[in-house]
Image (spheres, rainbow, N blue to C red):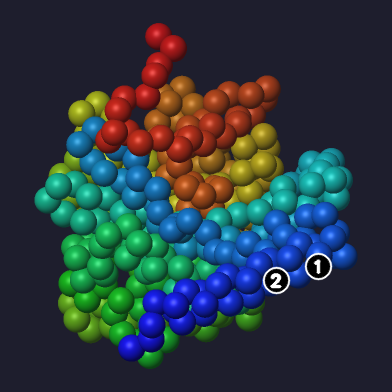
């Protein structure tokens, strides 16, 4: 054991060394510039967990972040004047065509229902595919999901269902999709006749659906048959043959999961006639959007739009000859009621 005197001497030595180190750091900061010492804090280079919850009546809806990307202006079809305006606006603000990809979890109190599943590993690059991680961050596991409702079979909405080696990510879930959608994308005959650019959409749809079909977990609907209490099917034709929205109601409140009614919110809300090259029936897609936007703006329905900026939840307001997006703002509805003007 060391004596108290030796101990205090070594402490003194350590203290003086610390003083010298601190002095050196201060001197170094003067050499490097007055704020160098402040710069020592690390940059974390990650974001808050990718989920956001809202209350809709008795339902708890959780937006699940899958990723972000940029929509290519060449993927939009509009008049020359409109598209010239888009090119000019994009030149001034390079973020104007930024998009998100999002899935949504509805906890009814009885069932856990996922609406669209993000891209998984099926949509190029590495920017998408975070939904499963967001689900865990939100406190759930894939095994807990009872039902998956898919708006359509593009891989940015269903890729998260299946791994590349053909395993179901949601092993206990029954998947529901419109029959017209399933029949189209899973048909070998239609795929064979489709243009080369469209082939990957068919291939991914078939690979993603395969393990659910094999397990008897792939279900189609063709009318308005009930799938979940308090949920209505909303056919939204145009983008794809069986493109479908899902409207949940609880205690007089509504939320519509609208799939790909809008891709580029800063273009298509002001110009609902502008379509995306991915819209299989361009005329029907534009007509669906025109009718739906007007109805939703009048009714003030909460919208869950996978490609709107995260958390991809908001309402429409009329603005000029078009509409603007009023996103939900961060609030804790379970803690206390937000203050209202009225
Ligand atoms: Zn999409």
> Which residue lies at the image location 63% right of the left edge and 49% below the top edge?
264
> Which residue lies at the image location 46% right of the left edge and 68% below the top edge?
130
The quarter in which the C terminus is drawn is: top left
Which label number is shown at residue 226?
none
> Which residue lies at the image location 38% right of the left edge and 82% below the top edge?
3
Residue 293 visible in the current orientation: no
Mark 2 closeness class: few <14, some 14–19, many ≥20 residues within 10 Å:
few
Residue 319 visible in the current orientation: yes
Location of residue 5 with respect to 135 vertically, above or below: below
Q: Residue furthest left?
A: 110
x then y, percent, for residue 107: 22, 50
The quarter holding residue 120 reads bottom left
Camera-near label (2 vs 1) is 2
The quarter holding residue 13 reads bottom right
> Which residue lies at the image location 58% right of the left edge and 24% below the top edge?
318
Check disc 2 and report the residue beneath it.
20
Check disc 1 and report the residue beneath it.
28
Figure label count:
2
Location of residue 41 with respect to 56 vertically, above or below: below
> Is the residue indicated by label 1 positioned so its CB lies within 8 Å of ligand 1?
no
Q: Residue furthest top?
A: 342
Question: Regarding mark 1 in the picture, which secondary structure is present there?
Answer: helix
The one of 143 and 212 positioned closer to us in this rendering: 143
Q: Is 143 placed left or right of 40 in the picture? A: left
- Sequence-wise, which precedes: disc 2 or disc 1? 2
The quarter holding residue 278 reads bottom right
């Amino acid at each position: 054991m060391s004596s108290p005197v030796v101990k205090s001497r070594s402490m003194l030595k350590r203290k003086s060394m610390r003083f010298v180190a601190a002095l050196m750091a201060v001197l170094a900061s003067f050499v490097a510039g007055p704020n160098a010492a402040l710069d020592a804090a690390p940059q974390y280079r990650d974001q808050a967990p990718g989920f956001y919850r809202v209350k809709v009546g008795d339902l708890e809806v959780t937006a699940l972040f899958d990723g972000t990307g940029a929509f290519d202006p060449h993927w939009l079809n509009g008049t020359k004047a409109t598209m010239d305006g888009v090119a000019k606006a994009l030149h001034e603000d390079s973020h104007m065509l930024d998009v998100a990809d999002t899935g949504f979890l509805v906890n009814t109190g009885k069932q856990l229902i996922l609406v669209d599943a993000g891209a998984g590993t099926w949509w190029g690059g590495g920017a998408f595919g975070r939904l499963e991680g967001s689900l865990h961050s939100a406190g759930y596991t894939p095994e807990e999901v009872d039902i998956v409702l898919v708006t359509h079979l593009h891989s940015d909405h269903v890729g998260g269902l299946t791994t590349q080696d053909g395993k179901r990510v949601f092993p206990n879930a029954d998947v529901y999709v419109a029959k017209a959608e399933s029949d189209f994308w899973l048909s070998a005959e239609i795929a064979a006749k489709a243009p080369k650019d469209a082939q990957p959409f068919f291939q991914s749809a078939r690979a993603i659906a395969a393990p659910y079909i094999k397990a008897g977990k792939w279900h189609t609907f063709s009318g308005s048959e009930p799938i979940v209490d308090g949920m209505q099917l909303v056919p939204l034709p145009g983008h794809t043959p069986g493109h479908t929205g899902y409207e949940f109601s609880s205690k007089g409140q509504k939320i519509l999961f609208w799939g790909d009614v809008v891709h580029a919110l800063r273009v298509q809300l002001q110009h609902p006639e502008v379509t995306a090259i991915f819209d299989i029936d361009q005329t029907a897609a534009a007509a669906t959007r025109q009718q739906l936007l007007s109805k939703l703006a009048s009714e003030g329905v909460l919208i869950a739009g996978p490609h709107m900026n995260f958390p991809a939840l908001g309402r429409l307001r009329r603005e000029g000859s078009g509409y603007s997006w009023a996103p939900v703002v961060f609030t804790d509805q379970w803690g206390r009621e937000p203050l209202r003007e009225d």
